[in-house]
Amino acid sequence: MKNLFSRSTSAYKSEFETVREAVKNKDWPFLLASILFFAYILLFLCFARPPFNSLYNPIFIVLSLAVIFFCVWRTGLKFNIGVFGVLCYLIIVFAINAAKGIYSLSPLIPPIAILVTYEFASSCRKRENELLLRLVYIALIILLVWSYIRYMPDWIETRDVSIFLDGFFENLDGLTDYFAILFAISLHYVGKKQWESIMVSLASLFFIIASERRTGLLLCLGAIVLFAYFKFGHKNPPAFAIGLAMSLVVALLILILVPQFQSLGDRILAAVQSILTYEGQFAGEPRLALVIRGLVYGFSNFFGAMGYDSIANLLNSTPAHDLIGDLSQNYGGLVGITTVVFFSIIAFKMLFKSRGDRYLNSFYGLFFFLFIFLGTFLYNRAFCFFGGFFAAFSFNSVASPAFPKKRALVVC
């Protein structure tokens, strides 16, 4: 028991030591950027409502300036094909919106968040990135605990899913997607023998199941499969595939035959059956049909940019809500299709060619693909905030030197 406790606390001691060394070495730019990083992520996760959302952009501007100063002071700004692609997207989006007389920050902040967190994490050393990951983890746990306090007493009494739909934190789909990310990070810590993270994993998964969110459930299942593969199955893929198939059969039999699990099985079955269904304006219409229509619209409207918030859709004056369709209607098919291909290549590299923690990187590669398909990635600053962070984990895992030569730009 003593060894178990020691193993669980050693990581926290290491991360505290990272902070202590930064203070000792007077690494104030890193400390300032880290504090702002945590403050911003906690704000937009836990306080996504008025009047707090009016603080998002000012704090984000300060964070961005702090990160730029830190990067220039530490290693210089990274510049590669990924950074170039996001910059091109920002320039094109701003130019089209300005030409249409639209000056909203909403379409600009999420891709800027990719750049900010990517540059920040890329300029950090390995132990510093572990500290940043822990800050993300803590912020998500705070969100989870607060969500349990707000919703679970009523849910236990009524079993009514509608209690989750009050929008106190955010759209329920977005909320449970954050918990899916928390679930994946928790498994990452479980793999490092920090066993207390098992409780966080179970709590995250239970909230997603209770709220009957199929996207969050799909992400959790993907995280479990990826975790099992990189932990056990990569040494013998055929045996892993057989074991996975047998596990699915056993789980299915338990859900069918054990009375206590039948209601849970019904909810999971409903989620699986409707995984490609979009509820709302297009109730019952397969999500795949939306993507195909968006793709057709993209090629038929190759240069017909309309500008953000000036969309005239073919159906009900509502965006199609797939990334290709939304971008094609806002900025033309050329921008829409090119952007989706660009992020798909990044997701593919995270799945199969990353250099850091393969499990976390592969999970977020799966996350990229799923949300490219669902059409919310580039319109959700939290997803982009996490996206730039994990992209840096994937492609810049080599630790930077303690006192590198100062440069304003690094091409890599």
Image (tube, rainbow, N blue to C red):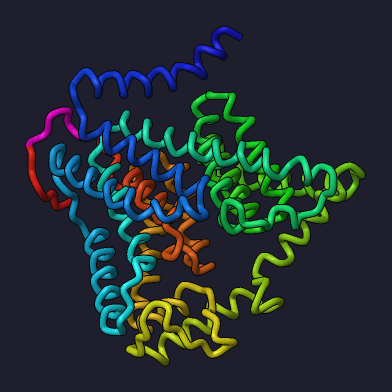
Residue 384: x %, y % from top left: 40, 56
Judge whether 379 appears above or below 163 on screen.
Answer: below
Q: Is residue 335 magenta?
A: no
Residue 217: x %, y % from top left: 65, 52
Q: Residue at x 74, y 65 (%)?
A: 273
Give the prevailing secondary structure in the magenta stretch: loop
> Quick one: which residue is furthest to the front in this view?
51
Q: Where does the magenta region start and end?
A: 399-405
Q: On the image, which quarter does residue 13 sit in?
A: top left
Q: Is residue 400 magenta?
A: yes
Judge whether 171 appears above or below 204 on screen.
Answer: below
Residue 132: x %, y % from top left: 37, 36
Judge whether 298 appears above or below 75 on screen.
Answer: below
Q: Is residue 243 visible?
A: no
Q: Residue at x 66, y 43 (%)?
A: 205
Judge whether 352 appears above or below 407 on screen.
Answer: below
Describe residue 34's horizontal placement relative to residue 250 as left or right: left
Describe residue 36's horizontal placement relative to residue 411 as left or right: right
Between 267 and 315, the one lying in front of the other is 315
